[in-house]
Image (spheres, grey):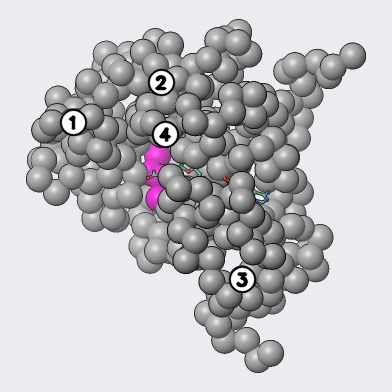
Amino acid sequence: MPPRFPNPARYDTMTYRRCGASGVLLPAISLGLWHNFGAVDPFATARATVRRAFDLGITHFDLGNNYGPPPGSAETTFGRILRRDLARHRDELIVSTKAGWDMWPGPYGNWGSRKYLLASLDQSLRRMGLEYVDIFYHHRPDPDTPLMESMGALADVVRAGKALYVGISAYPPDLTRRAATILASLGTRCLIHQPKYSMLVREPEEGLLDTLQELGIGCIGFSPLAQGLLTDRYFKGIPKDSRAAKPHGYLKRDEVTDAVRKKMLRLNEIARARRQSLAQMALAWTLRHPSVTSTIIGASRPAHVADAVGALSNTTFSPDELAAIDRVLEGNEAR
Ligand code: NDP
């Protein structure tokens, strides 16, 4: 007999963390659908990956208007999975989407105008077959649109009931502060910020994480595995089915250098001493910071999700471990 879906014990082991000073709890590990859920990808694998995630207590699925390829198709795929498997569980899910990057031709399909943000969210809702999303993000700052206009659009989607909460992505600390102030003046909380954060991208440590903590805004880091570099995926070369080998992947072949591989193998030794895979240690490392609510993984198969959730059995680091990791990352090792 196939195992029962969903797993009745799905909420027993996952860790849920409060999103800033809000009422929302997010799973420590969330699943993102940027890659591997487009119309070009096998639906059966996409479906199995989402089901596995839900079975393991992952309640948060992160999308964007442009995820695919082609753009929009990840939302369509997710809508199909929702209808087949999760329709009865809508109230157990936090579904997010975003607008801010190039989506459709002409002057109204990109950046941060009210015209673009409102139309894009309506399109996303249609593709997913949803009446509302839980979180709607402005995907990146727009230097040419008044911040008041972009934030005003976010506040209005909450008022219209099309999003329960709003967030921002890739905003620097000073702009985050201004955006949060504007949203508050319009009666809407900035729930969450989504920065790129991993052992290889530590920029949020230079002010953003402290700002978010001060403002009571949650933080969900993206690409915590540096698109697969911080895993065993590239230890022996570039596998044919990996992101670096794909023409539409954002990880380029020439980013997988011998120097990177050498560092990853050293980090893997530290991970093994912690009884973790490199991926698990990389995820636990992002979660060590008190400002971080959740970390959003990508996955090309259900096993990646299970490996990620395994990280939660060891999320503490000794000062010696952290120092050893820093030495590898900075290339200052004695050996
Ligand atoms: P990751 O850094 O987690 O990379 C995911 C890739 O790593 C997978 O596709 C897979 O590569 C590999 N991988 C994952 N787990 C394992 C494992 N256990 N063992 C070996 N390899 C593994 O995240 P993404 O770059 O995919 O980003 C995650 C999410 O973050 C996105 O889906 C999106 O929701 C969000 N995001 C947000 C952005 C923003 O601007 N706000 C921008 C980018 C992402 P392979 O496919 O080769 O198997």
> Identity of the amino acid at label 1?
Pro
Circle 3 or circle 4, nearest the eye: 4
User: Label 3 crowding class (10 Å Cα cut-off): few <14, some 14-19, many 20+?
Assistant: some
Q: In this image, 133 relative to 56: left or right?
A: left
Callout 3 touching callout 1 (CB < 8 Å): no
Main secondary structure of the magenta stretch: strand
**Quarter assignment of residue 89:** top right
Mark 3 or mark 4, earlier in chain: 4
> Identity of the amino acid at label 3?
Arg
On residue 69, which mark appears? 4
Mark 2 or mark 1, earlier in chain: 1
For the record, the magenta segment spans 190-195
Mark 1 or mark 4, earlier in chain: 4
Q: Where is residue 32 shown, x and y percent of the image? A: 51, 37
On residue 105, which mark appears? 1
Circle 2 or circle 1, nearest the eye: 1
On residue 261, which mark appears? 3
> Identity of the amino acid at label 4?
Pro
Question: What count of labels does the image hold?
Answer: 4
Residues under labels 2 and 4: Cα distance?
Answer: 21 Å
Q: Where is residue 326 shown, x and y percent of the image? A: 58, 75
- Position of residue 278 relative to residue 3, above or below, is below
Residues under labels 1 and 4: Cα distance?
Answer: 16 Å
Which residue is outermost to the right? 1
Secondary structure of the residue carrying tag 2 is strand
In this view of the protein, which residue sits in the foreground, 330 or 102?
A: 102
Callout 3 touching callout 4 (CB < 8 Å): no
Disc 2 target residue: 133
